[in-house]
Image (cartoon, rainbow, N blue to C red):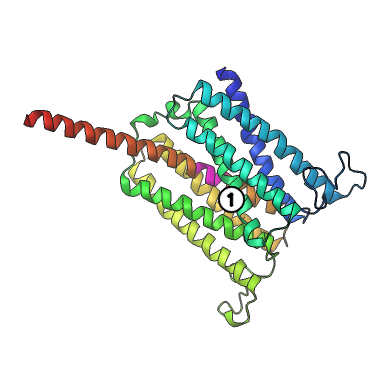
């Protein structure tokens, strides 16, 4: 059964990446209306007759989402049943299904009734949470924590809180990036890092789309600096822990790539491949942060257990 779970977890994780990239592709190519206003069928037909590139992209995204949804459901059920004794498995199983269904419902509602850009921008972030849950399930199934001896790892409370805050802030930055896509604000600023490098502080002439674009750049810049500072702090304090050293090195490398691809979107005039890589890298970055949340929660539980044990011992001594 463990072998089956391993295969399912890999297929589900890769499939979730395809869902994320497929959703970004639908948005970038404006293929959301490729199947008309009907769902789950395209134009109300089981086999579409009027084929267009937009229809192929939208229908492919729906098919992949449906197939991966079944795989994730199966993975969650079997994980709950066979390895539910592991502390985080049941919660992650619930998260992966709940947010996958939620993002599917938002996608369906957007097709059938239409949604505002501000609502649609949440779609990618919701998918990201589902992907992170599936990714963590895969790590637990492969017992990555045992290979890195994470049980002996203690992350102090200050650093745990900062990891939680950074992860939540990442979701905000992801939302602003999705809002850039849904409001067609990708190329409203022709320069980088400022909207107009020759007049960087000329805010009076900004349109709403330019404010959205520059708001995302500012938020992303803060995310990069925050990640860099936390990376050096983690390396300094946990340099003897392999999972912290290599994990945070990976996180910093990913956020650096993310900034690079973000700039390249402007320089290449929204090259589709670059834009999809931009979506892929932030997905991997968020998944890594989610893993550190898991390690932090374990560290907090272990700290609480030790504290209660010490209090109990002190009470016995007093008696």
Q: Is residue 147 left or right of residue 57?
A: left
Magenta segment range?
Answer: 284-288
Closer to the camera in the image, 98 or 178: 98
Residue 17 x/y as whole percent: 65, 40
Q: Is residue 195 above or below residue 231?
A: below
Q: Residue at x 68, y 60 (%)?
A: 182
Q: Residue at x 71, y 45 (%)?
A: 22
Q: Residue furthest right?
A: 49
Residue 247 x/y as whole percent: 46, 40
Residue wearing tag 1: 125
Q: Is residue 169 left or right of residue 49?
A: left
Q: Residue at x 6, y 29 (%)?
A: 319
Closer to the camera in the image, 279 or 302: 302
Q: Is residue 158 left or right of residue 318?
A: right
Q: Residue 3: within the magenta?
A: no
Q: Main secondary structure of the magenta part?
A: helix
Q: Is residue 174 above or below residue 187?
A: above
Number of numbered tags placed on the structure image = 1
Q: Residue furthest bottom?
A: 204
């Amino acid at each position: 059964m463990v072998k089956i779970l391993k295969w399912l977890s890999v297929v589900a994780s890769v499939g979730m990446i395809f869902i994320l990239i497929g959703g970004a592709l639908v948005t970038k190519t404006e293929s959301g209306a490729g199947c008309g206003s009907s769902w789950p069928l395209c134009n109300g037909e089981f086999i579409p007759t009027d084929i267009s590139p937009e229809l192929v992209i939208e229908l492919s995204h729906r098919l992949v989402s449906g197939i991966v949804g079944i795989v994730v459901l199966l993975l969650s059920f079997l994980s709950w049943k066979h390895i539910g004794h592991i502390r985080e498995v049941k919660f992650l199983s619930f998260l992966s299904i709940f947010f996958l269904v939620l993002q599917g419902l938002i996608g369906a509602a957007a097709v059938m009734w239409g949604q505002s850009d501000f609502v649609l921008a949440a779609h990618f972030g919701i998918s990201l949470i589902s992907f992170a849950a599936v990714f963590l399930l895969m790590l637990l199934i492969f017992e990555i924590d045992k290979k890195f001896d994470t049980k002996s790892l203690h992350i102090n409370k200050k650093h745990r809180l900062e990891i939680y805050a950074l992860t939540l802030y990442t979701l905000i930055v992801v939302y602003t990036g999705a809002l850039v896509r849904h409001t067609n604000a990708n190329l409203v600023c022709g320069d980088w890092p400022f909207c107009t490098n020759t007049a960087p502080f000329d805010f009076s002439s900004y349109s709403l789309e330019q404010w959205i674009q520059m708001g995302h750049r500012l938020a992303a810049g803060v995310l990069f600096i925050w990640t860099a500072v936390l990376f050096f702090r983690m390396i300094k304090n946990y340099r003897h822990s392999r999972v912290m050293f290599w994990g945070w090195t990976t996180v910093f490398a990913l956020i650096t790539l993310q900034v690079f691809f973000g700039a390249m979107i402007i320089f290449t005039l929204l090259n589709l491949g670059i834009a999809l890589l931009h979506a892929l890298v932030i997905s991997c970055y968020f998944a890594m942060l989610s893993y550190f949340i898991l390690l932090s929660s374990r560290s907090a539980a272990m700290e609480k257990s030790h504290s209660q044990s010490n209090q109990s011992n002190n009470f016995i001594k007093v008696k």
